[in-house]
Amino acid sequence: MTDHAFVQVVLPGVVEPEELQVRHASVPQPGPGTILIAMEATGVSFAEQQMRRGRYYDQPPFPFVPGYDLVGRVQSTGAGVDPGLVGRRVAALVKVGGWASHVLVDARDAVEVPEGPTAEQAETVVVNGVTAWQMLHRTARVRAGQTVLVHGAGGGVGLILVQLARAAGVKVIGTASARHHDALRALDVTPVDYRTGDVPARIRELAPGGVDAVFDHVGGRSVIDSWHLLAPGGTLVAYGSASTRDDTGSKQWPVLKILARTWLWNALPNGRRAHFYNIWAGKKLQQSRFRARLRADLAEVLAALRRGEISAPVAARLPLARAGEALRLAESGTVTGKIILTP
C-alpha cells in the first residue's frame, strides 16, 4: 500500500456541508485486537446531520471523522486476531470514523456479511436495521396480530422497521409524506400524511382501541401524542428528537425531556410502558453482552436482507471526496433511501 492512499472526511466544527475537509495520509496499521477494513460502502444518516450542527447527544469534540457505520473487506489484522479474516466482507457500527477509505475497528465489533447482498445493499441495513430490529423485538417485543404505529415510515429506520414488522405478522400504520404512500401501500402498510390534518385523530380512526406500540423519532409534542395513542398494555419507543435538529441551545435538553417523560409515564399504574431507545446502551458497563447482542441482531437483519424480507433503496452513490454534497442531499429531504459513500 502506497503512502497517502488513505482518505478521510473531517468535520472541523459547526459548518456547512460544503466545508467538510477531505484529508489524505498514510494507511493506518492495526494494533493488537484490531482489524483494518478497506471501506466499500458507508452511509449518510440523520446522526451526521445532527453532528454537523453540534446537536447529536453524545458526539465527540470537533474535529472528528463522521460516519456511523460501514461495510468493507478486512485488509489486515493485528496481533491476536485470526489472520483468516483477511479478505472477508464485514459490517461494523462505529458511531464516528466511517467516512474514511480505511477504518480501524476492534475485531470483536465486526460482523461478517453473508454472500449474496452487495456491500451497498448491506450498508443500507446496518445502523438502520439493527435499530429497527432491536426496537421491534427487544424493546417493544411485538407479536403477530398486533398493530403498531411507525412515525417516519418512509425514512431510513422507518422503512426497515415496517418491513420487519410485516415479516413478523404485525399490522402497520405509518406516517410519511405523500410521496412515500404508494411505496408503503406496496409493503402492506397503511399510510397517514403527517403534513395534513389531525394525525392523532386519523390514527384513532384506524385503531379505535389504540395501537400496541408506537415508534417515535420526532420528539417534542409528537412523543406526548404517541403516548396517548397506545392501547392498554402498549409500548412507546422514542428514539430521537428529529423535530429539534435545527434548534439552538442545549443538545442534551430535548433528549433529557423525553427521558423525564418516560420515567413519569412508567410510574403511572396503567400497564403501558415508555422507553427511550439508544443503540449504544450498555456498551460501557456490559461490553461482552452488548457485542453479543449486536452481533446476533445484525446477523438477523442481514439474513432477512438475504431472504428478501427487507430491502432499502439506494438513493444516491457519491465518492467519499463528495461527502459534503451527499450530506447536503440528505438534508434536502428530496430523496428516498440511503445515500451511500464509496471510496
Image (cartoon, helix red, strand yellow):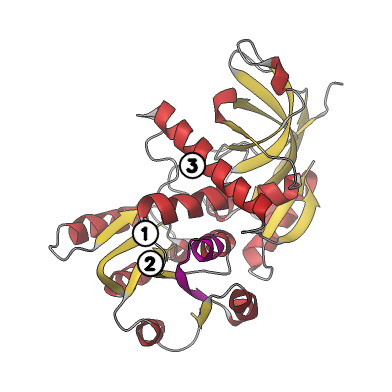
Specify the amino acid type for callout 1: Val
Category of crowding for the residue at label 3, using alpha-carbon neighbours closer than 10 angstroms: few (below 14), some (14–19), many (at least 20): some
Question: In the image, residue 168 lies at what x, y percent?
Answer: 48, 61
Question: In the image, residue 275 lies at what x, y percent?
Answer: 31, 55
Q: Which residues are magenta?
A: 163-175
Category of crowding for the residue at label 2, using alpha-carbon neighbours closer than 10 angstroms: few (below 14), some (14–19), many (at least 20): many
Query: Which quadrant of the figure contains the N terminus?
Result: top right
Residue occupied by mark 2? 214
- How far is disc 1 from disc 2 in space, using C-alphas? 6 Å
Side of 304 relative to 142 (left or right): right
Front residue of 323/147: it is: 147
Question: In the image, residue 259 lies at what x, y percent?
Answer: 29, 54
Specify the amino acid type for callout 3: Gln
In the rendered structure, are the residues bearing label 1 and label 2 in contact, judged by CB atoms less than 8 Å apart? yes
Residue occupied by mark 3? 59
- How far is disc 3 from disc 2 in space, using C-alphas? 27 Å
- Hey, which quadrant is residue 327 in on the image? bottom right
Residue occupied by mark 1? 237
Earlier residue among tags 1 and 2:
2
Between circles 3 and 1, the one closer to the viewer is: 1
Residue 235 in the image: above or below residue 33: below
Asked if residue 99 shows in the view, the reply is no
Query: Which quadrant of the figure contains the C terminus?
Result: top right
Question: In the image, residue 205 lies at what x, y percent?
Answer: 37, 88
Residue at coordinates 18% horizontally, 59% vertically from top-left?
264
Question: Outermost residue toward the left?
Answer: 269
